[in-house]
Amino acid sequence: MKQPPAVISSGISGRGAVGAFEEMDAANAAYAQALMFFFTGDKTFARNGEKILETYAATVTSHEGQAWYLLVSWTGAIFPMAADLLHATDPDWKNDRVIAKWFNDVFLPPLHNRIAFGNRELAVINAMGAIGVYNEDPAAFYEALNHWVNCVPAYYYLTDDGPAPKVPDYWTPEVTPSDEFLTTLDAPTFPKDWTSWIAQSRENFSVDKRRGKLGDDITYMTKSVNAKDPGIVWTGAPGTYVNGYCAENSRDLGHVEVAFDSAMNLAEIAWNQGIDVYTPAAKRLTTFMEVFASLRLGEPPPASVTTPLHPMAMGDIYEIPYNHYHNLMGIDLPNTQKILETVFIPAAGARIDPVAPGDAGHDPANPRLYKFPAPYPSLFAFHIAGDDVWLAAFQPLTHRDLNAH
C-alpha cells in the first residue's frame, strides 16, 4: 500500500487523478481483509485491514476535483463496512473510534445535503447509511433513509405513478430533514469532543460555496421541481416513461447498474438494522429488475424509446435483491434468475469478453447483441464485468449472515 496523499482528487472519468484509484483499491482491500479475518480467524488479516484504515484516517483530509463528492461516496460506502466488521470481530482493535472521527470530519460533511440525482444521489445515500451505522450516528443514518425512500420513487418509474414519474423533490426543505432536526437527533450520543459533521458541512460545503461546481445538480434539480417536470432530469423523456425503467436507462445501462447497486446496498444495511425498506418498494424494484434483466437478455425497448440504449459493461447487481425478494419474500423473478444462472454463477467474478472485439463480436442472429463464448448467452453488453470495482464489493457476501452490525 502506497502512502496516500492528504488531498485526494480526480476529474471526470478519472482524468488527472491523484490517489483516487488507490483509495478505491484500499477500501476494497480493507473490506476483503476483514472478511478473510472473519472466516479464517487469522489476525494477520485483521491487522492488514486495520492498518489500511488507520493509514488513510491519519493522512487523508479532503477530496477535491470534479469528482469531489463522488470520491467520498464511493469509498465512503466500503471503508465503513470494513471498519464495522473489524470492530465487531476483533476485540483487540483499539483505534476504531479514530476511524469514526475520520468519517465524521472528512466524509459526512461533503455528503450532507448534497443535491444530486440518479446514480450520484444513490451513491451518496449508500455512503451516509454505511457511515451512520458504523459511527452509531442516528442523524446520518436518518438522512440516508429519508433520501432513499423519497429518491427511489423519483428514479424508478411504475405506470401506477401516473403518466409521469414523481418529481425529484427529496432534497427540498419540505422533504429533507433540517439541520436543526438532525442536530437534535444526534445530541444525546454525539461525542462531546467532536465537531458535528452538520456544522462542518454548513461551514465548508454549503450550497452557496458549491453552487455551480460540477456534479452538484442544484440548477436542473431546481428547474425540475419548480416546473413540476421530471423530464428535466430524465434521459429520453417522455419516451422513456416506461414501466420498470429508470431515469438513466437511456444514458447507459452501466450507470443504471451502479445506481441500483447503491440502492440495494442501503436497503440491506437498513435491513440489518431492523428497518425494512424492501417491502414498501417491492413492486417498483422487482419490476425494474425484471425489465432491466430482459434488456440485458436481448429484449428490445418499446417503440416509445427513441433515444439509443448504450449497453456498457454488465455487472452483477442482482444477488442482494434476488436473495431478499425471491428467496425471502417468494416473488417470482424469472428474468433475474436467468441472468444469475446463465451469466453470473458461471462467470464467478471473471471478466468475460465477446467472442471477438468491436463489431465482429455481435451475434449474427441478432446484431443488437454481443455473442459471448459458451456457456454464456448473447447479451446486450460490451462485456461481463468482473467483481473488481468498489461497487461490487458488497455483492459476493452480504453481512446478513455475519455476526456484525
Image: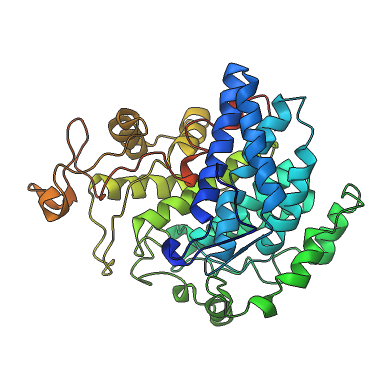
Lateral position of residue 4 relative to residue 108, left or right: left
Please tell me whether residue 370 is drawn above or below residue 237 in the rendered image: above
User: Looking at the image, can residue 15 be seen?
Assistant: yes
Lateral position of residue 358 relative to residue 243, left or right: left
Q: Residue furthest front?
A: 3
**Residue drawn 58% across and 79% down?**
222
Which colour style is shown? Answer: rainbow
User: Looking at the image, can residue 244 be seen?
Assistant: no
**Residue drawn 47% across and 30% down?**
330
Lateral position of residue 195 relative to residue 39, left or right: right
> Which of the 4 image quadrants contains residue 13?
bottom left
Please tell me whether residue 214 is drawn above or below residue 23 in the rendered image: below
Across the whole image, how many numbered discs are drawn on residues?
0
243 or 102, nearer to the observer:
102
Q: Quadrant of the N terminus?
A: top right
Please tell me whether residue 373 is drawn above or below residue 315 in the rendered image: above
Residue 262 position within the rendered picture, expressed as x and y whole percent measured from the top left:
53, 49
**Residue drawn 55% across and 73% down?**
217
> Which of the 4 image quadrants contains residue 83?
top right
Residue 219 position within the rendered picture, expressed as x and y whole percent measured from the top left:
56, 80
**Residue drawn 77% across and 37% down?**
95
Q: Quadrant of the C terminus?
A: top right
Residue 60 position within the rendered picture, expressed as x and y whole percent measured from the top left:
66, 54
160 or 271, nearer to the observer:
271
Residue 105 position within the rendered picture, expressed as x and y whole percent measured from the top left:
75, 57
